[in-house]
Image (cartoon, grey):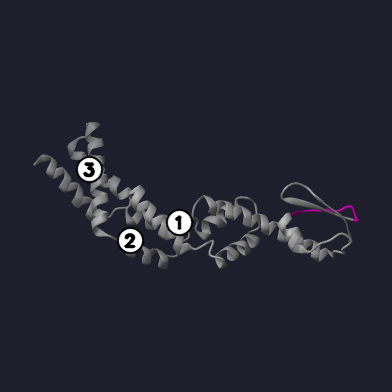
Amino acid sequence: MKIIRVVRKDEKNVIVYFDNDVKLILSEDVFYNSGLRKDDEVSEDRYSFFIEQNILFHIKQRALSFLGRRFHSERELLQKLKSKSYEERLIKIVLQNLKDHSFIDDKNFASHFIEEKLKRKKWGMNKIKSALYTKGVSSKIIDKLLKEFDNTENNLESITEIAAKKINQLRKRNVDEKKLYQKVITFLLSRGFDYETSSEVCRKIIKQDFD
């Protein structure tokens, strides 16, 4: 089939008209990279190729939009793009391209995730580890980074701060002192702190309050 006319659809797209009454809407970027011109003959295979290239372009733009808001793991992006009804085969082509150009890096993502959850959210290591697994980060990356971020002094400071705050909240609600310890322990475990440290910190705070 032969191109008989090319017109701009809007600021980002053009419409390519063919002599068989077929029209093809392409992003401006894909069109200019294609080298298509009026009077060009386009085979069915080449036509299909440009359709696929156009879809790949839009998948990439959507992925970059997600990445512009915050860091994402590869699995997160895959799931978000699949939810937009894009074909998984094409999504994976885009994700590989983004990885090759360092737009996606699970190690970099995990590093920022750990730092943010430790400093701002005051999460414990167990909760962080579980969340990263869910986001598809490999255990090798997770274990390596958690060792790098593992600071006993900072972790103890965080859990002490959180435990003291929770104890005060429960006492204001007149929670029975006999149930106080277990409620705080359960809360700390839900935040990802280990039982041994949680128990030690909780007992220390309660004991100090009664000394």
Question: For mark 1, does the 10 Å Cα neighbourhood hold few (<14), some (14 to 19), or many (20 or more) residues?
Answer: few
Name the residue nearer the viewer: 33 or 64: 33
Amino acid carrying label 3: it is Ala
Residue ID at (56%, 54%):
79
User: For residue 60, which quarter of the picture?
Assistant: bottom right
Residue ID at (33%, 64%):
148
Which residue lies most toward the right here? Answer: 19
Q: Circle 2 sits on which residue?
A: 149
* Count of numbered circles on the image: 3
Amino acid carrying label 1: it is Thr
Q: Is residue 21 in the magenta section?
A: yes
Q: Is residue 116 left or right of residue 187?
A: right
165 relative to 27, above or below = above
Residue ID at (21%, 39%):
179
Percent across and percent down for residue 206 are: 16, 43
Q: Circle 1 sits on which residue?
A: 134
